[in-house]
Image (spheres, rainbow, N blue to C red):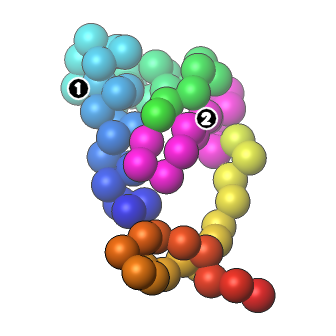
Amino acid sequence: LFSYATIQAFAEGIKRAGSDDPAKVAEALKNGTPISTVVGDVTFDEKGDLKNASYDINQWHDGKYAPIAQ
């Protein structure tokens, strides 16, 4: 799912930039506006790093994608 979310964020960057030029896409993603993805909203800071990044271990269970209990 994270790979798909990455493609969603990149596609939104292209849309916002109005171009597929990598520098323009990167700049368009750095504005702090959330991007809706399959793993939730993601936001990038002025350096291009994810804000509030969290990493969970999940599994498919009974047809649902859920965190593994600790």
At horizontal 43% and vertical 70% (from top left) the residue drawn is 64
Please state the horizontal and vertical placement of residue 9, each as a whole percent of the image.
Answer: 40, 38
Q: Is residue 13 above or below residue 39?
A: above
Secondary structure of the residue carrying tag 2 is loop
At horizontal 57% and vertical 39% (from top left) the residue drawn is 42
At horizontal 38% and vertical 62% (from top left) the residue drawn is 1
Q: Name the kind of residue labelled 2 in the image.
A: Phe
Secondary structure of the residue carrying tag 1 is loop
Whether pointer 2 and pointer 1 mark residues with C-beta atoms closer than 8 Å, the reply is no
Near-viewer residue (66 or 7):
66
Please state the horizontal and vertical placement of residue 17, each as a whole percent of the image.
Answer: 35, 15
| Residue 22 sits in quarter | top left
Q: Which residue is mark 2?
A: 44
Q: Name the kind of residue labelled 1 in the image.
A: Asp
The stretch in magenta equals: 37-50
| Residue 60 sits in quarter | bottom left
At horizontal 70% and vertical 85% (from top left) the residue drawn is 69
Of tags 2 and 1, the one toward the viewer is: 2
